[in-house]
Image (cartoon, coloured by chain):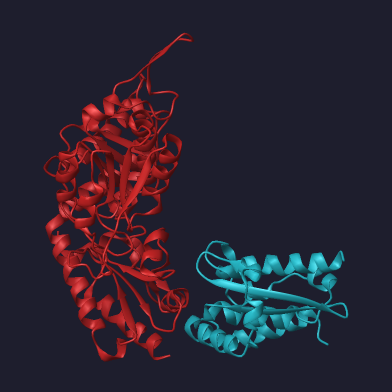
Chain colours: A cyan, B red
Amino acid sequence: MKSINEVQDEIIDNFSLFEGDMESKLFYLMDLGKKLPAMPEAHKGDDYLVKGCQSKVWLFPTLELGQVNFEADSNTEITKGLISLLISVWNGRTPEEILNSELYFIEKIGMGSMIGSQRSNGFASMIRQMKMYALAYQQK
Amino acid sequence: MELQSIRSHFPILHQEVNGAPLIYFDNAATTQKPIEVIEALDKYYRTDNANIHRAAHSLASRSTEYFEQTRKTLADFIGAPEAETCIFTKGVTESINLVAQAWGRKFIQAGDEILVSTMEHHSNIVPWQLLCEEKSATLKVIPMSDSGELDMDAFYQLLGPKTKLVACVWVSNALGTINPVKEIIEAAHKQGALVLLDGAQALSHFEVNVQEMDCDFLTISSHKLYGPTGVGALYGKRHLLEAMNPYQAGGEMIKEVRFEKTTFNEIPYKFEAGTPNIGDVIAFKAALDFVTKTGKSLIADHEDRLLSHLLEGLKKEEFHKVKLIGTASKKVSVQSFLIEGKHHFDIGMMLDARGVAVRTGHHCTQPLMHRLGIDGTVRVSFAMYNTIEEIDQFLHVLKRICAR
């Protein structure tokens, strides 16, 4: 299995094709979002809603054999694309790996504005929430 | 001033965003600043900076003079009878809170009613909610139609002897609706109620005269009127301002301070405790002068043309998924919309990817969004420097988004 940073570097490499072309980047992100496995409606309750000012994000964590897995969804396509990247980086990792990792790919692919302000979208809150779940699992 | 040359006064407009020329259609959030404003601010800090009032030295008398000149210019701009009836604040939010605290806490009593409209900005809802809670008064809401027009029949039903204040937005920030405020004021006054008009979105678009309108309070924003951020004003009728309690306490607002008892300064200083935002107030005058020089009627005609051009363009078949939000018959150059099957946030991001700046979300009008059964819109809002060509480019980008 690739390391967290190897996956991040791969993402950065893929996005380098869109350098200077924000529109294509967004379209690519939205296509990625469409490939995200559907989240069971039962897991989209209010308890799993991470609220942002503009977009909604649902996040449902599980721990199996010491590995964390997240199901997630959003009502905005761009956020959903970013979620699919985040899941490719963090799913199947141990709580320790998640907590010790540093997410740098979001800035590097030029989507830093998505995590700049908690108000604008649920994505930044989602990252925090994922780490909180990892912390809770670690202390179990 | 020729409209064609207006753009050359706004340095910020001449830049690229994401590889495309910036198209700034977020003017209802804040307008850009002409070079005259930027230079006035620069000049103030280079040559005139000193704390105003009560000083013997030359810089202080200069800055005091310029500061008070803005007050006079603003009074003329809104048709106020005297400069002292204009109080500087940090913006519309503070202006409304000032009235809620200094007038409301003194004059609102248990059982009284305050009317607001469905399309208020949060800043013209929450201060009244807090006041009503404190005073056991009731907040009532004027309903509106699906197109975004106030239900005036319902307004007359709601208005009664218990109504002490109608706090109403002149122009809706989210929908662009121009409300029939003259009618509201006349009806309210007949019942003995006061009227506060939120003028944040009105002053940049059309001629405003508080004496003709006979409103009791008007709130004013500098940054939505081509001036600096962090400055606003409250206009109030003299006898009301004089009867009100002080708002914040400190320097400037006092006449005499003794530990036994403090007496308060005259208006407007009674409400201007502490060192104000001197530099930005002084630069605000340059914005007012710029708008006056350009001419409100010229601006209004131009913006009407822009809105008509947009609405005409959106009638085309390729935009059949576009749903207009806010279609009142009297509107300023603001248009909210949604695209079927797309989230407003995604639309905003995709427009930005091609250099178009719009606002997305609930526009701080959650009760309005709730009334419309949506959780946000995409909003384009035009200013004097926008062009027909920019709208054509916007429609071109929007067509690509709709087609996706």
User: Which corner quadrant holds the C terminus of chain B?
Assistant: bottom left
Residue at horizontal 33%, vertical 49%? B140
Please identify the quarter of the rendering in which residue B35 is found. Answer: bottom left
Residue B15 visible, this angle: no
Residue at horizontal 47%, vertical 83%? A23
Please identify the quarter of the rendering in which residue A102 is found. Answer: bottom right
Percent across and percent down for residue B399 are: 34, 87
User: Which corner quadrant holds the N terminus of chain B?
Assistant: bottom left
Asked if residue B391 lies left or right of residue B80, the reply is right
Asked if residue A88 lies left or right of residue B314, the reply is right
**Residue nearest the viewer, comparing B200 with B165:** B165
Q: Is residue B136 above or below residue B61?
A: below
Asked if residue B362 lies left or right of residue B2, the reply is right
Residue B208 visible, this angle: yes
Percent across and percent down for residue B178 are: 21, 59
**Residue nearest the viewer, comparing A65 with B284:** A65
Asked if residue A9 lies left or right of residue B66, the reply is right
Percent across and percent down for residue B101 are: 39, 34
Q: Is residue B279 above or below residue A28?
A: above
Percent across and percent down for residue B351 are: 41, 77
Residue at horizontal 74%, vertical 83%? A7
Q: How many labels does the image show?
A: 0
Please identify the quarter of the rendering in which residue B241 is found. Answer: top left
Residue at horizontal 37%, vertical 54%? B121
